[in-house]
Image: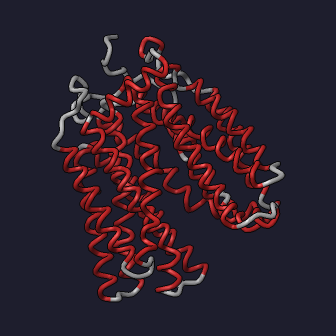
Amino acid sequence: MTPGAPAEPRPVSRPGLRLVFLGLVNAMAAFSTDTHLPALPNMVSALHTTEAAGQLSLTTFVIGLAIGQLIIGGIVDARGRRGPMVAGAVLYVVAAAACAAAPSIGTLLAFRVVQGAAAAAGIVGARAMLRDIVTGPRAATMFSRLYLVAGVMPVLAPLVGSGLVRIGGWRTIFVAMAVIGALVLIGTATLPETLTPENRRIGGLRATFDDWRVLVHDRRYVALVLTLALAVAAMFGYLTSAPFVLKDRYGLGPTEFALAFGFGAAGFIMGNLLGGPLAGRAGAPRVVAIGCGGLVVSAVGLVAVQATHAPLVAFLLPVLLLFVSTGMTVPNTMALAVMPHPQRAGSAAALLGVSQFVLGGSIAPIIGVAGASGWGLPVYEVIVAGAAALCYAAASRTRDVVSEQPSLRQVAV
């Protein structure tokens, strides 16, 4: 195989089952963060610490996840996918068990960093493995399926966490994480290696830096990274402000709030299910364009709702469009960004993953400056959605640096 040539997709037995498993692995970050949120008050009390210190259990995990993705991206390109994923699963189980037995908040926070870095191995490996086994228009559909589980997890995980807290206390949640990690380890060990030795990168850390240099100089890739991160930021913005808007402005109780919150998850699933098949027929670029347009329309709708003091039903309509658009945009943007870089798919997936948490997660809290239940959310959504649309417009007008790679629309399955 010549350097830079696209890796040929390898036939995989029982692809549907393997795709479901890779989707579960890809959702490990959401499971590891959202499940333990209901346990924070009990954990803070039991460890005799402050609420701020308890909330750091989320921050430290995300820090470990971001750093881990940057490191593991080059490793899975050089060593193959399965080995690093297995090692990450082992480390995840150990870290989760250590968190369950942590005698102090300091110990728990230290192992949360380790747990986040370990989860990164599975997430990056799963995305790179999917790049190995599918290509062409079908790739966008497969990436949509990969994100389907991750999209549902933020809604299901807190419910699971609440049940575990009632059954056995806050430590039970980390025990459950260790059990899930063990199941992931068993499943990963049965996966075939999808990156053959002749297709692997050589050169160690220097090769990883070389990969990053190529990626950051690929203006189309960078524009797609920003498009994806801003689409995620649009979703995060609603998630962080929803408790204030739904409870303070519309006065919803716990049951009504849960139903309204689940409305968004249903929209993400809908967009995901629509975006995959549509990409197979019309092409992923067109689906991302539609998704970015939907984000802008939803933002304008939120402005209209705020200006007219519209009722809850009117508020939920642009929210539904926001999540449908995100469900269409994110997986297809991921496919468009990763597919032209088969020799550095791990690094490409890693930088995409980091961007979601660093940019998507960091700018959402600025809504609070203007007031989440007032103009903060609609103004934020207009800015973020508009920026996402502009970034994708720039990506559409820019050629790949790796010009010898066929585009997603050109490759035959």
Vertical comparison of 60 with 270: above or below: above
Q: Nearer the viewer, residue 192 or 246?
A: 246
At 76% from the left edge and 48% from the top edge, which residue is drawn? 107
Locate residue 38 relative to residue 209 in the image: left or right. right
Total number of numbered discs in the rendering: 0
Coordinates of residue 285 in the picture (x, y in percent): 24, 45
Coordinates of residue 365 in the picture (x, y in percent): 47, 66
At 69% from the left edge and 67% from the top edge, which residue is drawn? 51
Locate residue 368 relative to residue 51 in the image: left or right. left
Q: Quadrant of residue 181?
A: top right
Vertical comparison of 47 with 413: above or below: below
Q: Nearer the viewer, residue 60 or 228?
A: 60
Residue farthest to the left? 397
Q: Quadrant of residue 64?
A: top right
Image quadrant in which the C terminus is located: top left
At 42% from the left edge and 71% from the top edge, which residue is drawn? 367
Q: Nearer the viewer, residue 165 or 277?
A: 165
